[in-house]
Image (spheres, rainbow, N blue to C red):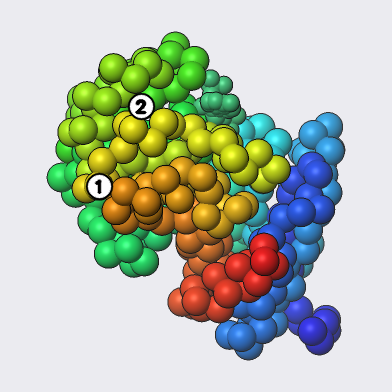
């Protein structure tokens, strides 16, 4: 990596930030595309967020990613928010142009591109069952609604949160969303009707690799099962789904595509998706 006075910087703001895979993935992509940018992990405490955002906009930074715990809080410190990120209520990517910051959310788009470009599945007309109702579920559900999903079921341990997310979607888009209590009889009926099942919870993530967010008996072979957990790459849910013949998709692809989308916003160039995937896959091994 050759750093000169002309080098431009991109950051990732989080707390803690030590185990983020994005610096390795983005720096590999910049190098491969011969772009004179460096991607820096920046550990930012919540109380310093405002000051850091202001400072980065005055320095030679073209933008930054935002990760936990700042994705919601960051909104009040940015000059402009993309409409889509506004509805989601969270920002994971910021572009800095002429000292002005604009926030976007590429999580849902990353999820969508992984489905379309990697698994060759179109969302239009599909029925989708989402486990979880947190920030990740919100980005995914909004993106699915915007892209023509026919039905979205939201199933969450805390039912009230599923109701709240469904209401938000039904108020902003066509009324396609329905909350589902996390009880087998209700889940079964909705899953039997669904084309795609998404786990947006952390259940199954390392080190709890023997856990699955859903009992295997509720799956059926015509489902596409998409787990946003990427460590491990093959979760218990994906193993169960594969065993009954479902098509599966690992969360590693969503991680890569949300990064690819951000890369394309900062550089205006097509992201080397395969290289980015190989980079994070190698680290996780
Ligand atoms: P993120 O931004 O990653 O989506 P989040 O907003 O904290 O994180 O949301 C976490 C989601 O995982 C929630 O839907 C949560 O369910 P609750 O709303 O009931 O808390 C879900 N979740 C976390 N641990 C879970 C568990 N052990 N079983 C089922 N759902 C779980």
Q: Position of residue 254 (x, y in %)?
A: 48, 56
- Ligand 1 quadrant in view: top right
First of labels 1, 2 by sequence position? 2
Q: Residue 107 placed where, x, y %?
A: 49, 49
Left or right side of 244 for 52: right
Q: Which residue is mark 2?
A: 154
| Quadrant holding the C terminus | bottom right
**Residue on which the image places disc 1:** 221
Callout 1–callout 2 Cβ contact below 8 Å? no
From the viewer's side, name the closer residue of 68 and 52. Answer: 68
Give the structural element (helix, strand or loop) at label 2: strand
Seen from the viewer's position, the closer of residues 57 and 252 is 252
Q: Residue at x 67, y 63 (%)?
A: 284
Residue 59: x and y, percent? 78, 62
Q: Residue at the spot x=34%, y=33% of the render?
A: 217
Quarter where residue 39 is shown:
bottom right
């Amino acid at each position: 990596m050759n750093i000169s006075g002309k080098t431009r910087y991109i950051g990732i703001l989080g707390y803690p930030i030590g185990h983020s895979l994005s610096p390795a993935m983005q720096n590999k992509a910049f190098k491969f595309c011969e772009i004179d940018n460096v991607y820096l992990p920046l550990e930012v405490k919540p109380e310093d967020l405002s000051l850091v955002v202001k400072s980065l906009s005055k320095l030679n930074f073209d933008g930054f990613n935002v990760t936990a715990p700042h994705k919601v809080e960051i909104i009040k410190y940015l000059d402009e928010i993309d409409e889509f990120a506004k509805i989601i209520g969270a920002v994971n990517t910021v572009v800095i142009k002429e000292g002005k910051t604009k926030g976007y959310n590429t999580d849902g788009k990353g999820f969508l591109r992984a489905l379309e470009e990697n698994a060759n599945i179109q969302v239009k007309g599909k029925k989708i069952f989402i486990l979880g109702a947190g920030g990740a579920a919100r980005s995914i559900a909004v993106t699915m609604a915007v892209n023509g999903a026919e039905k979205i079921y939201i199933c969450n341990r805390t039912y009230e949160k599923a109701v709240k997310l469904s209401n938000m979607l039904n108020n902003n888009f066509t009324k396609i969303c329905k909350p589902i209590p996390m009880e087998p009889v209700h889940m079964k009926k909705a899953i039997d009707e669904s084309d795609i099942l998404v786990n947006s919870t952390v259940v199954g993530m390392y080190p709890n690799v023997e856990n699955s967010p859903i009992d295997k008996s509720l799956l059926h072979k015509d489902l596409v099962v998409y787990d946003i957990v990427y460590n491990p790459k093959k979760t218990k849910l994906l193993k169960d789904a594969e065993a009954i013949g479902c098509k599966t998709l690992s969360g590693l692809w969503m991680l890569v595509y949300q990064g690819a989308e951000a890369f394309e916003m900062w550089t205006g160039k097509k992201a080397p998706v395969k290289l980015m995937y190989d980079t994070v896959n190698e680290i996780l091994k």
